[in-house]
Amino acid sequence: MLTQNEALIRKLLADVASGSMTPDEAFMALKKQDPISQDQYEDLGFAKIDHSRRQRNGFAEVIFCEGKTPDQVARIANSLLKYDNNLLATRADISHFTAIQTVASDAVFHERGRIIQVVRKKNAQPFGLVAVVSAGTADQPVAEEAALTAETLGTEVLRFCDVGVAGLHRLLDCLSDIRKADVIIVVAGMEGALVSIIGGLVDKPVLAVPSGIGYGANFNGLATLLAMLNSCASGVAVLNIGNGFGAGYLAATICRQIETARTAGREEGRHGK
């Protein structure tokens, strides 16, 4: 089975052979596929938009809205949408959304997760399954950022809300469904104990995200972060405080690799290897 790049090269060679494309045109088309080509970013003056991010990393560049003016966010979005069907903007507010609507009327704002999406092309089938588990209702903004990120990047997501350790029976009621996921994201505040409990009950990667929720001695999530870093459960990786986007992105990356391996295994089986 040809990779996407191999299929493109074969098509370009066929086009040159048939005379429908000149060698120079084929060269420029190949150059555009070079992930480190300087031609693959657009300089807006205040930002350099990386149009080869998908080729290098599997996903297009994402806009981090915090600290950017609405006009800057809109101009970045307009640049990205010239090259990609979908757009993801994080840590957005209503002013960023209003600005993006001027260049993408189909944009959707998810206020709870502070996410703006433009989805013009979906995968025929989602790849992989991610479970996003939040300990308490106050943790859900970070959990929703993670869930929306993973969904925008093409995975299927299951959400499990308010299943913290203060009422362990709530977690046990949905544990069998959580175990079905390829990757599990756990968002918690306070002492972060939910991460260790889930980590000890599943055989999948667990991505832990401190939400920043807690009383004074929680130090805005620092105590949770340190507790998660010291988890006694194996297979737990910890992200920064409130970094739902990072967890969703990493979960989607893992799922994409799993799906690639599954596809390769099916191809080998089909050809009797």
Image: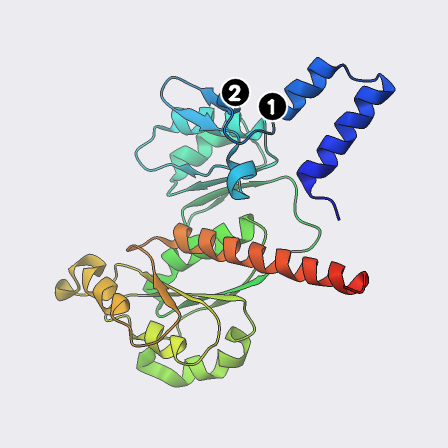
Position of 56 relative to 126 (above/below): above
Three-letter code, disc 1: Lys
What residue is disc 1 on? 31
Residue drawn at point x = 48 percent, y = 71 percent = 204
Point out the image quarter for the C terminus. bottom right
Q: Nearer the viewer, mark 2 or mark 1?
A: 1
Colour setting: rainbow
Image position, residue 25 (x, y; %): 70, 16
Residue drawn at point x = 30 percent, y = 80 percent = 166
Residues packed near mark 1 inside 10 Å, few (<14), some (14 to 19) or many (20 plus) = some
Image position, residue 41 (x, y; %): 48, 24
Q: Residue lying furthest right in this view?
A: 18
Res 100 visible: yes
Q: Earlier in the sequence, mark 2 or mark 1?
A: 1
Res 87 visible: no
Quadrant of residue 18 within the rendered picture: top right
Q: Nearer the viewer, residue 263 or 172?
A: 263
What residue is disc 2 on? 39
Position of 218 relative to 34 (above/below): below
Image position, residue 54 (x, y; %): 54, 38
Residue drawn at point x = 48 percent, y = 31 percent = 100
Quadrant of residue 106 within the rendered picture: top right
Q: Secondary structure at mark 2?
A: helix
Q: Secondary structure at mark 1?
A: helix
Image position, residue 257 (x, y; %): 56, 56
Q: Is residue 191 left or right of residue 152?
A: left
Label 2 close to label 1 by CB (< 8 Å): yes
